[in-house]
Amino acid sequence: MRKFTLALGILGTTAMTAPALADDHLKVVTEPLELTIHMHWPRAQGYDENYPVEKAASEMTGIHLKDATAGRNSTDSSEAMNLLIAQGSMPDIVGGHMVQQPVNQYGPQGAFLPLNDLVKEHAPHIQAFWDSHPGLQQAISAYDGNYYYIPYLPDGEFGRAWYIRQDWLDKLGLKQPQNVDEFHDVLVAFRDQDPNGNGLKDEVPYFARQWEEVARLLTLWDARSSGSDTYHDFYVSADAGVVHPYAQEAYRDALAHVAEWYAEGLIDPEIYTRGSSARDYLLSENLGGSTHDWFASTSGYNEALADKVPGLNFIPFLPPASAKGVRMEEHRRIPIKPDGWAISYQNQHVIETIKYFDFWFTEEGRNLANFGVEGQTWDMVNGEPTYKPEVLASDQAVNSQMYLVGAQIQRGFWQDYRYEWQWTSQAARDGIELYKANDLLIDQFLGVAFNQEEQAVYDKYWPSLRTYMLERQQAWILGTGNVTADWDDYVKTLDKMGYQDVIEVMNAAYKHQYG
């Protein structure tokens, strides 16, 4: 009930207004039907039956979801899924965070229902999405060719960008850096020339609120830090198939440069420990010079800190060209997430459930999933779903407000980028247009689905390999050891730990999934 109470507070007096619901053309059933659901994700360990979005969906479709989430005492969604599977008895719908791997593993064994034919026969709106987005259904399919969940499908292309203190550049008489060498020189100037004007050498030239963004600097020397919007992911090499970026010679050479920048004091000395508050603190104290972060949230600081840091002008700039002259943005919004929902083998209302899933892909359902309840959090203005002024003016982020009412949660739905565009500042919008005009995005690795033997190999070797890679990366950046001198021993250790076995099953899975 706590979330519902907070949601009513956010919505104010309009929250009690009857929502503008559609007529019965969206009804899935003639008599009310209750389906049980496991819904576990980072922001909520359970499904709130009092979500305004749930109540509206129930009225529209005739189907009410009843919470039956396992592992409610844990914030670990994978642990909650393991508990659910171990208990044997499953609710009708299993959804939430990172469901793709378990449903693709246990679906072919009978725990979850294949959706291919069900969608073709009973879910025309979902099928229309697959037909208009070739390759995505294939990307979420299990090794047997079936797919077992309806994913959360992000909208939009650009996510993160390179940001720089334009006000500092102006004060020091510098231009925006166009390549990695110019970027280095600008960061040196930020370090040495007191752009914040307090007489102290306290500026932090490059910072990040996620420590993983220090690895993003690798791209400036033509290496990779990830192949997707997930940190440290595999990528598809043009000549070697699926590989991991941290086992390539380009990584060795690039990481040596990153370590040099850290030793020179160009990277936040607390990059690994400062945490998620780094952006708030370093900008509000007029200390931070450059970062790589999300367009929408990062551009909001100029206005938010206008009184505390007069003249603050933290803006996106084009990625500096790499040592080989390549200008690219490695991060982009992935078109499919491993989050969503599936139908369990114990569901006795399969057709009704897939039709309910399809509801969220209708215009009314998609608006509900993205913006909340019409008349409460938004109105239709000139054919556009438009947030109410009190939503946009709230001290609480719009996405946080949506979570409280049951919108933008990790069900299977197609996100609408208009939801985010409305609270994206003009500076961020200009940055997105700048990035779009320069054709910076690269293809993403959409993942693979293992068969049982491949999964066993991956599970045996990859977790410890990943840990070792990250431990060595951090040590080299912080100055413990030298990546160039240590490289041969590092590669030998990777091989001893099973790296080649992992790459073999990754490529086998990639081949049978994508041909």
Image (cartoon, rainbow, N blue to C red):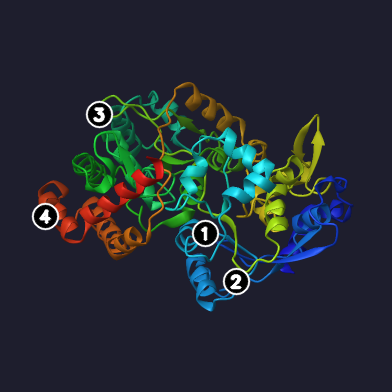
Label 2, label 3: how far apart the Cα atoms are: 54 Å
- Residue type at the position of mark 4: Asp
Does residue 411 appear left or right of residue 267 in this picture?
right
Find out whether the residues at labels 1 and 4 contact each other: C-beta distance under 8 Å: no
Quadrant location of the N terminus in the rendered image: bottom right
Which circle, 3 or 1, is nearer the viewer? 1
Q: Is residue 323 above or below residue 492?
A: above
In the structure shown, which secondary structural element does the residue marked by tag 2 occupy? loop
Q: In this view, does 54 lie above or below 140?
A: below
Provide the residue designation for mark 2.
Answer: 90
Q: Which of marks 3 and 1 is nearer the N terminus?
A: 1
Q: How crowded is mark 2: few (under 14 residues within 10 Å), some or many (20 or more)?
A: many
Label 2, label 4: how far apart the Cα atoms are: 48 Å
93 vs 121, nearest the viewer:
121
Mark linked to residue 99? 1
Q: Which of marks 3 and 4 is nearer the N terminus?
A: 3
Q: Earlier in the sequence, mark 2 or mark 4?
A: 2
Coordinates of residue 432 in the picture (x, y in percent): 53, 29
In the structure shown, which secondary structural element does the residue marked by tag 3 occupy? loop
Mark linked to residue 489? 4
Label 1, label 4: how far apart the Cα atoms are: 37 Å
Label 3, label 1: how far apart the Cα atoms are: 40 Å
Q: Earlier in the sequence, mark 1 or mark 4?
A: 1
- Residue type at the position of mark 2: Met
Which circle, 3 or 4, is nearer the viewer? 4
Label 3, label 4: how far apart the Cα atoms are: 26 Å
Which circle, 2 or 3, is nearer the viewer? 2
Does residue 198 appear left or right of residue 354 in this picture?
left
Which circle, 2 or 4, is nearer the viewer? 2
Find out whether the residues at labels 2 and 1 contact each other: C-beta distance under 8 Å: no
Coordinates of residue 427 in the picture (x, y in percent): 57, 30
